Image: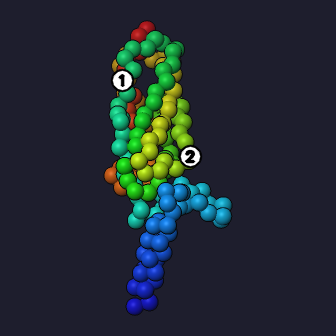
Amino acid sequence: MYMRSKKQFFCLFCFVFFACTNNQNPYTNTLGIEPSVIAQIDTAHYTLIKWQDSVFNFGTLKVNDSVHLKYIFQNVGKTPLFITQARPSCGCTVTNFSKEPIMPGKSGVITATMQSGFHTGEINKTIFVKSNTKNHTNSILIIRGVILP
């Protein structure tokens, strides 16, 4: 019975906490804990992400050239969305994303720069994205194209 009342208290706390935020970041705290860390462990309040396009085909590129990519997404859920990681599958790609929360209804961008190096031919690279989303906590973004000699 004690555990049940503890769970009820936690649920009530979360309800009040999220109902009273008025579209502000409910994970802001004075404990020195990154809000994205709290959002990642608060699985009961995961949000939803919708990618505009998770595949980017850059066409053709010359050897030792680079291409800049943008992956646009939208928070279609009811709580703030945090991107906590955008990890490329190889060292030829560098990613960048906002550490700030994407509020419900708003959009965000993950940018990437890929260096072709000396590889030639068709390529398929990936970027692994981790977020506090219940439809895909781990999304995969794809980079496709052909590198000409």
Give the farthest residue toward the bottom: 1
Residue 110 - label: none
Instruction: Tell me the kind of residue under disc 1.
Output: Asn
Mark 2–mark 1 distance (CA, rounded to whole Å)? 26 Å
Binning the other alpha carbons within 10 Å of mark 1 as few (below 14), some (14 to 19) or many (20 upward) gives few
Rendering coords of residue 13 (x, y %): 48, 75
Asked if disc 2 and disc 1 are in contact, CB closer than 8 Å, the reply is no
> Which structural element holds mark 2?
loop
Residue at the spot 36% in from the left edge and 39% down from the top edge: 51
Q: Which mark is residue 99?
A: 2
Front residue of 109 and 19: 19
Residue placed at 53% from the left, 39% from the top?
97
- Image point (52%, 14%), residue name: 64
Q: Position of residue 36 (x, y in %)?
A: 54, 55
Tell me the element at label 1. strand
Residue 66 x, y percent position in the rendering: 51, 19
Q: Residues within 10 Å of mark 2 (few under 14, many from 20)?
A: few
- Say which amino acid is labelled 2: Lys
Q: Is residue 66 visible?
A: yes
Look at mark 1 in the image and give the residue it sits on: 57
Mark 2 or mark 1, earlier in chain: 1
